[in-house]
Amino acid sequence: MSAYICIPICIFLLLGIFIPFFSIKRLPIVYSALILFFIILMVLIDLYSYKAWGYRLDAGFLKYLNNPSEAYASIGNLPVFRLVIIFFICWVISIWGINRFIVRNFNLIPLNQFKWQNVLGLLFIMGIAIIPIRGGLQLAPLNQSGVYFSNNNFSNISAINASWNFMYTLNHHTDNTVNPYIYLETARANKIVDSLYHSSSVSSLKFNMPKKNVIILVWESFTEKALHIEKDGKVITPGFNQLKNEGIYFSDIFASGDRTDKGIVAVLSGYPSQPTTSIVKVPSKASKLPILSKEFKMEGYNTAFYYGGELEFANMKAYLTGGNFDKYVTVSNFRNEDKNSKWGAHDGVVGDKFLRDILLEKEPFFYVWLTLSSHEPFETPVPVTIIGDDDGSKFLNSLHYTDSIVFSLINEFKKQIWWKNTIVAIVADHGHRMPSTGKKIDDFKIPMLLIGGGLKPSIIDKTGSQTDLAATLLNELGMDYKKYDWSKNLLDSTINPWAYFSFNNGFGFINNSNKYIVFDNTGKFIIEQTGNVDSSLIFAGKAMQQLSFQSYLDK
């Protein structure tokens, strides 16, 4: 990074030999102050972005600046005032140090003497600066993997220069036209993926009533880890823990990605997430995806989508409006006094409206609700139940709050005459890094439940993905799901049980034997696994990533 910074300095010195303006003594300190401003800012943002998201700052975060209010809400739990103070202290001290020990020495450079010698010397320095800029004389130029040195992935990630990484990804953050994840010959990759999706279409269960009402509750950051822990003797999700004993509970499900915009596509379109981008960011591609609301609309269902925030965030609005829902209820549909979250309206307010509206709806209906209260900054409009000022406690408390809302809502559904003809699917949009277990795979494991008056309680322990919800619902309701070719019916007794997920430039693959790998695309090695994994597991994950990303490119 220092080589990049030195190039403009050399240019200033070179121009200063011939143009008096560029020999002004203040110019180097002004340049240094600007460079330090951005470097220190990026380093501080990087520290907190890694804490929140688990990966280093890159150009991908710029997409969230398209909606400043949502971006601000997502950092609402950061100590902003403290960070501003730290930033200015570091900036002032750095400027003083640069001025005291470096800039003053510029006066010692006799630019007007030995003019042509200085010109040649500066041109030579600029020329050889190409070597550190590209990372050396080796064939391949420098990239992130060039600093990987350890078997410990955290150590490797920590070695990446924050400001360089941002500039590098900004330079490479374009619409991909070439698949960067080619690990296998296309024919072999196709054969592997075809075998993963092979089944004889033998369903273990068929919902016995046509035109069932369908409700999908997409629960923000609902990690499976929360089901098994208590804090200060308090169960985090007592309501859901009871509900999962009353329906069909899928006990080994994994989120496809790690962000809401990826999760909503996985649930409604059965489409896997992309490692370094999201298909909803490109409306021309997202519009080509199948979406459940259209399927139910064609079957005569009344459809609606509810979210207490702004659909414009992460460009989800373009994707969802393409779903032709009859009604969209968002933050603009609530009174100002009800917008009691930094994201918009809390789950309690939205849940009340969801219930009021659905009680007036004509059957059959297809309703979707994306919750938001368990998103950072983990606020709740009611007294705290899970005590603690740390992020982990606040997160668990927000899950506890939404759990009470969902449990109350389901109990109200049970009182309705249409309950016996209704299926409610409860699934997370993605998992969460908290509470930490030290295993990345645990951050992607999520609950998934089908509950309704006509469903018998059971536990399905097959490994699957949230992308499989689409095919499971459509098949069991007797509807065509051939367009959902990245989704499989988890109630088919002949399917291959497995799950694939992706994160920021990496992927994971799990089979039903609890064998799994987590693979880093940058370092090109496995960063997490169970014991000695079979090579077929690695090839399956690589084939899924290669072909799913190619599918994204081809749309």
Image (cartoon, grey):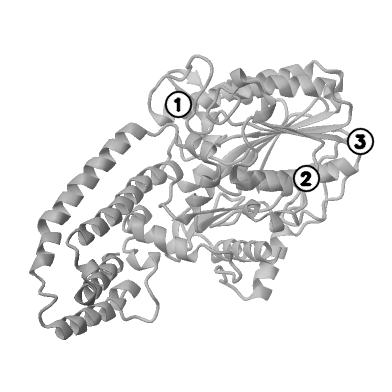
Q: Position of residue 237 (x, y in %)?
A: 56, 24
Task: Point out which mark residue 323 bears.
Answer: 2
Identify residue type, mark 3.
Pro
Q: Quadrant of residue 353?
A: top right
Q: Amino acid at mark 2?
A: Gly
Q: If you read the primary sequence from the N terminus, does the residue marked by circle 3 or circle 2 appear first?
A: 3
Disc 3 and disc 2: Cα gap in Å? 22 Å
In the image, what residue occupies the spot 89% across and 26% down? Answer: 362
Look at the picture and state if 426 lies above or below 335: below
Q: Position of residue 4 (x, y in %)?
A: 31, 68
Snapshot quadrant of residue 2: bottom left
Residue where numbered disc 1 is placed: 394
Mark in the foreground, 1 or 3: 1
Q: Identify the secondary structure beneath mark 1.
A: helix
Q: Amino acid at mark 1?
A: Lys
Is the residue marked by circle 3 packed among few (<14), some (14-19), or many (20+) residues within 10 Å?
A: few
Q: Residue at x 20, y 45 (%)?
A: 92
Q: Is residue 451 above or below residue 288?
A: above
Residue pictured at 56% horizontal, 49% vertical: 514
**How far apart are the two marked residues, 1 and 2, measured between alpha carbons?**
34 Å
* Residue 254 in view here: no
Q: Quadrant of the N terminus?
A: bottom left
**Circle 3 sits on which residue?**
210
Q: Is 372 left or right of 80, judged from the image as shown?
A: right
Q: Residues within 10 Å of mark 2 (few under 14, many from 20)?
A: many
Q: Can residue 139 be seen by looking at this rendering?
A: yes
For mark 3, give the secondary structure.
Answer: loop
Q: Is residue 3 above or below residue 410?
A: below
Q: Indicate left or right for 515 with 50 as reference.
A: right
Residue 390: percent from left, percent from top: 38, 28
Q: Which is more foreground, mark 3 or mark 2?
A: 2
Sequence order check: which comes first, mark 1 or mark 2?
Answer: 2
